[in-house]
């Protein structure tokens, strides 16, 4: 019952490049004060961090023998998140460390939503009468939104608060889903009919509103703290576009790179959208868009492909691109400097996955003479610096605004022996 939901939740997000390691990696020559913490000590199973809060709460998954989610904090250590059943998934963590997700109940009779905090632990959040509830988002006030089945098996968009419990946000719809809730209380979701997918927004002040439509199938994949939205839309002829919406601009089609498909991959706090799209010649190129008429093809590092993973509030875009000689390299792009090859740790390929507003870039790279990917930090002052690992290969899946990042590191050169880890920058004034 829960397995399809788990697969769905793990399908999106940043696309880290992972390769299995060969020989033990070369020892890093410089660590720049970052500390590596293995989060799953005592758990004899593969694990990975999926999300990271700004105050250091990590959530992720223990992958075997049964799929269960976990939360980790410096105060609690690793805590398995379960309501008594065999499987669970943590879907979101707020900026201040409130966790939500879903778990099978005792005997796997149903799937219920939960909330977890450091001081209280885990608690079930209720349901709308059916046997399946899956939270999707939580804000810093502890408001949770998601999907819940009714007793007649209709899927409803719900909002939960500690004060009022669980509430159906769109009671007149046959099928609806709530995807996001911002710290300001804006809820974003989708109303489904037999022929359309219509995006809605909800606030306590204005109630339920829709944002208009560019096609019958639109998906609100990204939202920032200001309530700006971005996502793909899909046409009946198989083509795909990207939309942007804000209270100020309304609904905007950002345009194309000359081809038939364009997809967003990230949205910044200042409303900049990045992603990738096809060109008139069929190549796939990274793009950046910051307002009507600004869609820019970032080009490539000499090859026929580039992909944007992230953008910060200053418009610094990071990702990876195929080079003229074939391997894919991490890149950084600015309007002033254009596309810059960040290089590698001496191996063939690299990818930049995240960037902070201060310009710190993290990602993974193959090391000199070895096939395994290793985590790196790049800044304009230091260039690319290899991070400590558990002796095998690394993947970076999440990053917080303070520069901490997380994912997994392998201890024995195999995917099965991967451990959830956290890399933390030096504390100001620590001397590290």
Image (tube, helix red, strand yellow):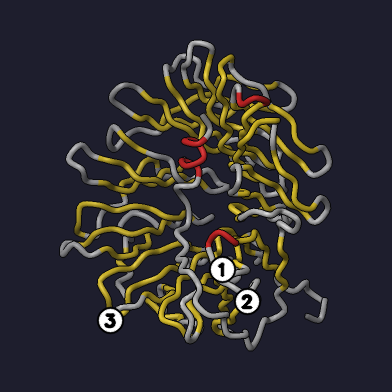
Closer to the camera, 125 or 372? 372
Quarter of the picture containing the C terminus is bottom right
**Image height check: is 419 above or below 348?**
above
Quarter of the image for residue 36 reads bottom right
Q: Of helix, strand and loop, which one carries label 3?
A: loop
Q: Position of residue 393 (x, y in %)?
A: 55, 71
The 10 Å Cα crowd at callout 2, few under 14, some 14 to 19, many 20 or more, is many
- Cα distance between the residues tagged 1 and 3: 26 Å
Q: Position of residue 424 (x, y in %)?
A: 70, 68
User: Left or right of 356: which side holds 402?
Assistant: right
Q: Nearer the viewer, mark 3 or mark 2?
A: 2
User: Left or right of 399: which side holds 4?
Assistant: left
Q: Which mark is residue 175?
A: none
**Image height check: is 52 above or below 193?**
below
The 10 Å Cα crowd at callout 3, few under 14, some 14 to 19, many 20 or more, is few
- Cα distance between the residues tagged 3 and 2: 28 Å
Q: Position of residue 7 (x, y in %)?
A: 47, 42
Q: Are marks 3 and 2 in contact (CB under 8 Å)?
A: no
Q: Are marks 1 and 3 in contact (CB under 8 Å)?
A: no
Q: Which mark is residue 387?
A: 2
Q: Which mark is residue 394?
A: 1
> Mark 3 = which residue?
324
**Image height check: is 228 above or below 193?**
below
User: Left or right of 254: which side holds 430?
Assistant: right
Q: Of helix, strand and loop, which one carries label 2?
A: loop
Q: Residue at x 71, y 56 (%)?
A: 40
N-terminal label among 1 and 3:
3
Q: Nearer the viewer, mark 2 or mark 1?
A: 1
N-terminal label among 3 and 2:
3
Q: Residue at x 60, y 48 (%)?
A: 64
Quarter of the image for residue 129 reads top right
Q: Are marks 2 and 1 in contact (CB under 8 Å)?
A: yes
């Amino acid at each position: 019952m829960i397995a399809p939901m788990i697969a769905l939740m793990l399908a999106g997000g940043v696309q880290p490049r992972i390769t299995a390691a060969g020989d033990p990696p070369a020892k890093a020559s410089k660590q720049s004060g970052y500390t590596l913490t293995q989060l799953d000590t005592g758990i004899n199973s593969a694990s990975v961090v999926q999300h990271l809060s700004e105050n250091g709460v990590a959530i992720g998954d223990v992958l075997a023998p049964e799929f269960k989610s976990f939360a980790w904090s410096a105060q609690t250590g690793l805590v398995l998140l379960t309501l008594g059943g065999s499987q669970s998934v943590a879907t979101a963590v707020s900026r201040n460390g409130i966790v939500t997700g879903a778990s099978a109940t005792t005997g796997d009779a149903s799937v219920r939503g939960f909330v977890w905090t450091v001081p209280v632990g885990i608690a079930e959040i209720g349901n709308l009468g059916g046997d399946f509830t899956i939270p999707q988002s939580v804000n810093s006030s502890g408001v949770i939104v998601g999907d819940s089945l009714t007793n007649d098996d209709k899927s409803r968009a719900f909002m939960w608060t500690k004060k009022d419990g669980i509430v159906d946000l769109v009671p007149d719809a046959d099928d609806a889903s709530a995807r996001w809730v911002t710290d300001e209380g804006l809820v974003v979701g989708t109303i489904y009919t037999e022929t359309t997918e219509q995006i809605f927004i909800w606030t306590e002040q204005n109630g339920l509103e829709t944002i208009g439509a560019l096609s019958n199938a639109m998906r609100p994949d990204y939202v920032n703290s200001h309530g700006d939205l971005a996502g793909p839309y899909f046409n009946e002829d198989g083509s795909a576009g990207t939309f942007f919406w804000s209270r100020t601009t309304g609904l905007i089609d950002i345009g194309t790179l000359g081809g038939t498909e364009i997809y967003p991959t990230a949205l910044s706090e200042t409303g900049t959208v990045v992603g990738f799209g096809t060109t008139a010649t069929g190549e796939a190129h990274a793009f950046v868009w910051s307002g009507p008429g600004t869609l820019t093809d970032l080009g490539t590092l000499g090859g026929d492909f580039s992909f944007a993973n992230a953008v910060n509030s200053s418009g610094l875009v990071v990702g990876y691109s195929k080079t003229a000689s074939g391997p894919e390299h991490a890149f950084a792009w600015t309007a002033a400097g254009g596309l810059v090859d960040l290089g590698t740790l001496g191996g063939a390929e690299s990818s930049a996955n995240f960037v902070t507003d201060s310009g710190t870039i993290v990602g993974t790279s193959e090391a000199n003479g070895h096939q395994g990917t290793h985590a790196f930090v790049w800044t304009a002052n230091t260039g690319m610096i290899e991070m400590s690992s558990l002796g095998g290969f690394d993947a970076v899946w999440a990053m917080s605004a303070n520069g901490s990042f997380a994912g997994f590191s392998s201890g024995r050169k195999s995917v099965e022996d991967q451990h959830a880890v956290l890399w933390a920058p030096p504390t100001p004034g620590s001397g590290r």
